[in-house]
Image: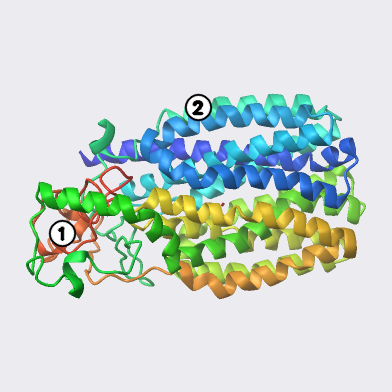
Amino acid sequence: MPSERSTSMRRAALGTALVFTGSGALLGTWVSRVPAIVARHDLSPGELGRALLALGVGSLLSMPLTGHVCRRVGSRAWVAFTSVVTAAALTCVGLATDVVQLSAALFALGMVYGSWDVAMNVQGSAVDQRAGREWMPRYHACWSLGSIIGAAAGALAARGDVAIGLHFTVAAWCVTGATIVGLLWYIDERGPASTGSTVALTDPPMAGRTPEGREQDPQSAPRQRQPLTAEPPVRDDPRHAGSTPAGPTPAGPTSAVVASGAARRGWRERLTGNRALLLIGLLTLCATIIEGAADDWLALYLHAGRGLSEASAALGYTTFATAMTVVRFAGTPAVAWLGRAGAVRAGGVLGIAGVLITVLSPWTPVTFAGALLWGAGVCLVFPAAVSAAGETDRPAEAIALVTSIGYGSILIGPPLIGALADVIGMGQALLTLAALAAGVMALAPAVRQTPSTTPTPTSTPESASPPAAASPPAAMSPPAATSTAAATSTPAVGGAPGSRDGDQSGSASIAR
């Protein structure tokens, strides 16, 4: 029944939001004590950058594999595992007694935290599609809210001179407990074809929604799931003329086996060779360098470069995180009004202004206002990129690819800014982020919604029946459908043409 389905999806969304909140709280916990970590180990900016490099290497080793793991075991099991190990790794970071131990603990933290990030975004994308809503910015708003909670608690711990090890241990395991509660409401995004999930993930899109389940708005036409390659299906390829009949091809066992084998052989090549995905990844890289610089350097810059107390410096980062949270909660109407690309482009403008004001203003209140603009500018880029990646026919792997490229910022940002800070000063090093914000503006069209050729009725999702178009989207067809729409869809592994490979997360779309 619609009411039962709606209740189930809202519970799944609540669980997803709780997991995002926990992830953000752990990062906020770490960021709030970076000045104390630097003082404890007597690190220069360059040495801190090299230590943070271990965090990035760990993330980039694990993240590309996470999409495949989620398809095998499901995001629920993987988030449960990675959240527990993340808590243990953060505890080790707090207890490290020298730079070698710190780097090793950060490497382990990067591996499990980065993999957790991918898995929870896969779940968020699945819930969005299944519910027919654009909740991704709000999930990331919950992540930002968690980072505020973690940073605020860290500021209190710093003011009270609480030992880093004790602070990290208590915070990590409290967050893990809350995360496990959120997992109770997760859905199995792999679908009924794999493990008999209790929530079917192949229902047709609701009326009044786009084929991937988003509310139709006047600024953007509906968008269908995009294949990872622009190459037409084999049966339409002139090189194979005469080998297959024209027109619809029955979805029998033989064709299913052929499609499955072709998809298994080529999905990695289609992912890495897809120009659109690589541009989305590059956009994410620019945004995550800008955001990560605030995570790693803003509190330290305010403390060491501007002479603020450790608690006041943590408050400066809290201002940044608060702006991210508020704007992400407002992200759904902002995207509806400006379009996804327009919202990202506007964010680039705010990012430039925020970085310049934060670094160049001599007045602390104005500096905090700059941090607010900095956070407001960068906050919608990561959710927009994940949503765009989730609209491909291999969403788990596409999300893993885009987020892996984005997390390359951990390899590039800290050592680059640290090295520049050693030479020209931390403030001047942070000014380079304005150029990356300009890059965000230039790359914004990469996440633009692509209009489909099939109009979607605009009735309400709860009361209206599914659209009765003459040529429905492929995702509305049953697995064995022989309609023209189904026959011309990009083949997918073991599932309905146009669906998520039979074991993915929805009937038709992930700040970071």
Determine which residue is flagged by label 2: 180
Task: List x then y, in percent, for residue 133.
Answer: 36, 52
Residue 170 sits above or below residue 299 on the image? above
Determine which residue is flagged by label 1: 486
Q: Is mark 1 on a helix, strand or loop?
A: helix
Task: List x then y, in percent, for residue 284.
Answer: 56, 60
- Residue, x 23% and y 49% (percent of image)? 260
Is residue 127 toward the left or the right of residue 157 in the image? Answer: left
* Disc assigned to residue 177: none
Q: What residue type is labelled 2?
A: Ile
- Label 1 packing within 10 angstroms: few (<14), some (14-19), many (20+): many
Task: List x then y, in percent, for residue 406.
Answer: 57, 56
| Residue 324 shows in this picture | yes
Task: List x then y, in percent, for residue 190.
Answer: 32, 40
Q: Which of 493 and 355 is in front in this view?
A: 493
Q: What residue type is labelled 1?
A: Ala
- Residue, x 68% and y 28% (percent of image)? 171
Is residue 234 toward the left or the right of residue 421 in the image? Answer: left
Whether tag 1 and tag 2 are in contact, CB under 8 A, the answer is: no
Q: Which of 11 and 237 is in front in this view?
A: 237
- Label 2 packing within 10 angstroms: few (<14), some (14-19), many (20+): many
Label 1 vs 2, first from the N-terminus: 2
State which quadrant residue 379 falls in. bottom right
